Image: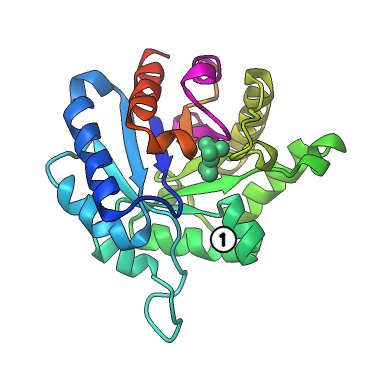
């Protein structure tokens, strides 16, 4: 399976979200997408708008950008995985570097969220990636592998088939700087090695997507890599023409 996920972050009004979704619906037919699954992650307040607009479009899935690991309770301002599932979300982004960096999400919190999402039958899009200093020190492969190992602690083989992994080098997110295709492939192959240790042959079927300033001008080379099974797209997912072009490139890859 190939996945193109658009992370809208804290952008879009209701009207902008509506227009973006209507354009994607009009353009991205099942024939055009082929084996590509498109996921959009609007701000949580617009989640049900997206779910309602896409009710007859199973090829366009809806993800939340975050969720709390508890089910219900006294956690002012939070939305739980159970509530996301109840609202009709298909998936949830977990452990995005902005959550880790600005909201203090530790590996252990990320792990709790992954387990909770799987329990609620939400597909977790689990984000991992190194900061620049770690790459410069040559420790990126081991650091990111450890991040993923901690995120997946306690995830059994039965549940693992719903996982999507996103490799997002922090230095490439929203910076205009992209990992080279070779850097992405090296990391994706390394992470698939961990998935194979944990889940055997299932590893070959789990999508590992790349994120970090991915756009139509650089995506073809990234998507052509053997272990790059799609993209998690920030900025370019807000421009319908760019996101559609990325879906076409992924389909062709
Ligand atoms: C992201 O936030 O997941 C992301 C990849 O952002 P951008 O494409 O804007 O770098």
In this image, 189 relative to 71: left or right?
A: right
Q: Residue furthest left?
A: 56
As displayed, is residue 175 above or below residue 8? above
Residue at x-position 82% and y-position 43%: 133
Tell which of 73 and 132 is nearer to you.
132
Q: Which residue is mark 1?
A: 111
Q: List x then y, in percent, for residue 157.
A: 47, 48
Residue at x-position 39% and y-position 26%: 242
Q: List x then y, in percent, for residue 187.
A: 67, 30
Q: Image quarter for residue 72?
A: bottom left
Q: Which region is colored magenta? A: 203-224
Q: Residue furthest right?
A: 137
Based on the picture, tell me whether residue 17 belongs to the magenta stretch. Answer: no
Tell which of 219 and 140 is nearer to you.
219
Q: List x then y, in percent, for residue 10.
A: 45, 55
Based on the picture, tell me whether residue 210 belongs to the magenta stretch. Answer: yes
Residue at x-position 21% and y-position 55%: 49
As displayed, is residue 138 above or below residue 66? above
């Amino acid at each position: 399976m190939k996945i193109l996920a658009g992370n809208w972050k804290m952008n879009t009004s209701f009207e902008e979200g509506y227009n973006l979704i209507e354009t994607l619906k009009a353009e991205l037919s099942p024939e055009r997408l082929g084996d590509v699954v498109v996921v959009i992650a609007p701000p949580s307040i617009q989640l049900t708008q997206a779910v309602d607009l896409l009710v007859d479009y199973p090829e366009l899935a809806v993800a939340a950008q975050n969720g709390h690991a508890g089910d219900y309770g006294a956690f002012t301002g939070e939305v739980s995985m159970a509530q996301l599932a109840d609202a009709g979300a298909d998936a949830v982004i977990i452990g995005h570097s902005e959550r880790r960096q600005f909201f203090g999400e530790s590996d252990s919190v990320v792990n709790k969220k992954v387990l909770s999402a799987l329990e609620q039958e939400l597909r977790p899009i689990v984000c991992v990636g190194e900061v620049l200093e770690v790459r410069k020190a040559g420790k990126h492969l081991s650091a990111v592998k450890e991040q993923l190992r901690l995120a997946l602690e306690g995830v059994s083989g039965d549940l693992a088939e719903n996982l999507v992994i996103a490799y997002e080098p922090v230095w490439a997110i929203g910076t205009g700087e992209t990992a080279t295709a070779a850097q992405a492939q090296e990391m994706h192959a390394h992470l698939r090695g961990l998935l194979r240790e944990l889940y055997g042959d299932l590893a070959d079927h789990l999508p590992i997507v790349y994120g970090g300033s991915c756009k139509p001008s650089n995506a073809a080379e990234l998507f052509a890599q053997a272990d790059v099974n799609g993209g998690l797209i920030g900025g370019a997912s807000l421009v319908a023409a760019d996101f559609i072009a990325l879906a076409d490139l992924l389909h062709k890859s």
